[in-house]
Image (cartoon, rainbow, N blue to C red):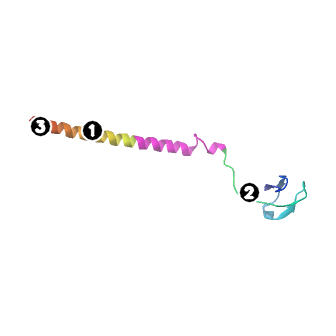
Amino acid sequence: MTCDCQHCDCLLEFDGEHAGKAVECPKCGKFTVLKAPTSYKVKPSNVGPNSIGMKILKVVIVLVLLGVIASVLGGWWANQSRFDRTMERLSK
């Protein structure tokens, strides 16, 4: 594992079992606490507009829009059919 000295930013390498212990920095001579990393960096290939999550989101948006369009057209067709039947009845 590695961490930076809190005083001079020297990179310190240590075994994980020593995390939390105070040691003397070989560069500045001051005592610093060895800290285990708390977070991991995400690789750039896992984020952005071409990530799998974004592709899935785009597909979902397209499917929702297609559903809305189908509903609107279906409603229009149903109303148009009802209108045509009403006009046929009135013309008799």
Q: Which quadrant of the figure contains the C terminus?
A: top left
Callout 1 environment at 10 Å: few (<14), some (14 to 19), or many (20+)? few
Sequence-wise, which precedes: disc 2 or disc 3? 2
Kind of residue indicated by mark 3 = Leu
Residue drawn at x 91%, y 58% as measured from the top left: 29
Secondary structure mainly formed by the magenta segment: helix
Identify the residue under disc 1. Answer: 77
Residue drawn at x 20%, y 38% as measured from the top left: 83
Mark 1–mark 3 distance (CA, rounded to whole Å): 20 Å
Left or right side of 52 for 40: right
In the rendering, which numbered label is found on residue 90?
3
Callout 2 environment at 10 Å: few (<14), some (14 to 19), or many (20+)? few
Q: Which quadrant of the figure contains the N terminus?
A: bottom right
Sequence-wise, which precedes: disc 1 or disc 3? 1
SS under mark 3: helix
Identify the residue under disc 2. Answer: 37
SS under mark 2: loop
Kind of residue indicated by mark 1 = Trp
Boundaries of the magenta span: 44-65
Residue sitting nearer the eye, 7 or 43: 7
